[in-house]
Image: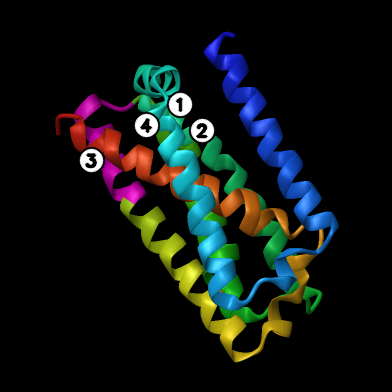
Amino acid sequence: MPVALLVRLLLWLWLGGALAFGHHGLWGRFPPFGQLALVLALAAGAFSLLHRVPTLARWREGLDERVLLLPHGIRLAGIYLVLRHLEGDLPRAFILAAGLGEACLAALALPLALAPLADDARARATRIWAVASLVNLGLILVTLLRLNLQGPLQLRALAELPLSLFPTLVLPLALTGSVLVLQRALRAPG
């Protein structure tokens, strides 16, 4: 099977699993630390597959770092989180990192991937972006845990579709992608 087809198949399976998870409202049944563990386990699983399966590892190594930045456009979903906050579905504390932070990082990733920059300038900018991305993702996870420990009903909207895709698909993909981008940027000259 061609590796590109395998990657697409794995992503479609993940999306299907995340949709089923959200359809049945399973996110809300996890305790706060269980939710955090699920996000981290999904990210670790994706990262592990991309490093331990030889076909996927070769495919990952062959990707240009700009291609690794493009999928971060999905993080524009942060705008939808802000809109749901305005409707009263999500608390302000969650929106600062999850909504605004994610939208800003997505908006920065796209020009970084597409702008005609010198290699050393791109490597520096990519390192800065990747560190900012990981800091923001860490803030999201800490805020998610803190709010759930204070009162899980604050984030009950994350248990239903389409918002359930944020913790079960967007966050783990963003974590995996940000680590991959940082790994690649640290190896680049500049």
Q: Residue at x 49, y 49 (%)?
A: 43
Q: Residues within 10 Å of mark 1 (few under 14, many from 20)?
A: few
State the mark number for residue 48.
Answer: none
Q: Nearer the viewer, mark 3 or mark 1?
A: 1
Residue highlighted by disc 1: 67
Q: Residues within 10 Å of mark 4 (few under 14, many from 20)?
A: some
Residues under labels 1 and 4: Cα distance? Answer: 17 Å
Residue 95 showing in the rendered view: yes
In the rendered structure, which disc, 4 or 2, sits on the residue that comes first in sequence? 4
Q: Residue at x 59, y 74 (%)?
A: 94
Dot 1: what SS? helix
Residue highlighted by disc 4: 51
4 up-or-down from 81: above or below: above
State the mark number for residue 70.
Answer: 2
Q: In the image, 144: left or right of 59? A: right
Q: Are marks 1 and 2 in contact (CB under 8 Å)?
A: yes
Mark 3 residue type: Arg
Front residue (pair 35, 189): 35
Residues under labels 3 and 1: Cα distance? Answer: 17 Å
Residue 36 position within the rendered picture, expressed as x and y whole percent measured from the top left: 53, 67
Residue highlighted by disc 3: 124
Residue 39 position within the rendered picture, expressed as x and y whole percent measured from the top left: 54, 58
In the rendered structure, which disc, 2 or 3, sits on the residue that comes first in sequence? 2
The residue sitting at the left extreme is 190
